[in-house]
Amino acid sequence: MEIRIGDRKLLLLYNASAGTGVARRNLYQLITQLAEKGCETVAYPILPKRGLTTERIVETLKERGQHFDYIACCGGDGTLNHLVNALMQAGWNEIPVLYVPTGTTNDFARSLHIPGDPARSAALLDHGQAFCYDIGQFENRYFNYVAAFGAFTAVSYETDQNMKNAIGYAAYILTGVLSASDSLMSRIHMRIEHDGIIEEDAYLFGAVSNTTSVAGIKSPALSKAEMDDGMFEVILIKAPDDLNDVREILQSLAQGNTEGGYFRVFRTDEVRFAADQEVSWTLDGENGGEIESAVVRVVPKAVRILVPDRRLS
């Protein structure tokens, strides 16, 4: 079959360091697949240390009057996070995104059944559908699937994959807590307001999520999440008092039970957090900064992404 040349213009942003270097190894195959789909591809590597950030690339190309039919992102969930922020800032969020997940956990792609193989990903240009999904706004930044706080949020993305699969989402997070000498003493006092409700307590962990999978595995508390319903799922774990309490929490999570007194799970479209100290946050696994208060709200159906037909069937 004869290849159509330049029928569609596509911007490709790739992070060669994501995951285990899959993007670097598959780049030629991906560009070949895009060419066979009739794409005129403009490719940029993401090299933050040299000033080539996703935000700068998108902003500069827009200022120069460039137009693209599609924007492809090859990297992990953090790479996609930067792209979505860039698209929102540039007003390019109506351009369909072709996501080629090459990260370590690929939570977001897993929730939407987006394949990681370059050939299957490129096929979405012809056989996929544009799915408009909700994103989250965290102060002046955006996230795709999770904004989380807690003393061990960094640990959750560094835990060995075998441990993630064997123990489970929140259970392995708390296992990570036990490995740090001061983790059991971590108590983040928060005032949380949503839907006319105000609650206040000391928390070990909290997450506002829009996904069925976090950190590489699925959680029963997220099983009913829909990514275009205008609502987020909030999971809060109260700070335990001693080691026996931690064991109780671990046992409950291992059984998929979040009904106990240490857990608070609810759905909302906006939630306000206020602490009496600076709290570290993570957005899609990226550093979200340290702040005392934050408003997290849903931006309904803000971004268009190509997904397999079966996702919308």
Image (cartoon, grey):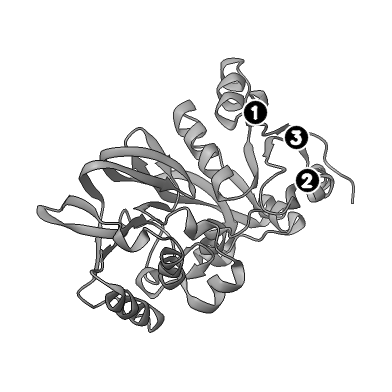
Of the residues shown, which amino acid type is indicated by label 1? Lys
Q: What is the number of the mark on residue 41?
A: 3
Of the residues shown, which amino acid type is indicated by label 3? Thr
Q: Earlier in the sequence, mark 1 or mark 2?
A: 2
Q: Position of residue 174 (x, y in %)?
A: 40, 68
Q: In this orientation, which residue lies closer to the viewer: 76 or 61?
A: 76
- Is 119 rendered above or below residue 175? above
- Residue at mark 3 to residue at mark 2: CA–CA distance: 16 Å
Q: Position of residue 197 (x, y in %)?
A: 10, 55
Q: In this orientation, which residue lies closer to the viewer: 244 or 128?
A: 244
Secondary structure of residue under mark 3: strand
Determine which residue is flagged by label 1: 49
> Depth-wise, is mark 3 or mark 1 nearer the camera?
1
Q: In this orientation, which residue lies closer to the viewer: 34 or 18?
A: 18
Asked whether disc 3 touches disc 2, contact meaning CB atoms under 8 Å apart, the reply is no
Instruction: Tell whether 44 sits left or right of 87.
Output: right
Of the residues shown, which amino acid type is indicated by label 2? Arg
Secondary structure of residue under mark 2: helix
Quadrant housing residue 139? top left
Q: What is the number of the mark on residue 123?
A: none
Q: Earlier in the sequence, mark 3 or mark 1?
A: 3
- Residue at mark 1 to residue at mark 2: CA–CA distance: 18 Å
Determine which residue is flagged by label 2: 24
Q: What residue is drawn where x is 77% and y is 34%? A: 40
Q: Residue furthest right?
A: 2
- Is 195 rendered above or below residue 238? above
Secondary structure of residue under mark 1: helix
Categorize mark 2 by other alpha carbons within 10 Å: few (<14), some (14-19), many (20+): some
> Depth-wise, is mark 3 or mark 2 nearer the camera?
2
Q: What residue is drawn where x is 55% and y is 28%? A: 55
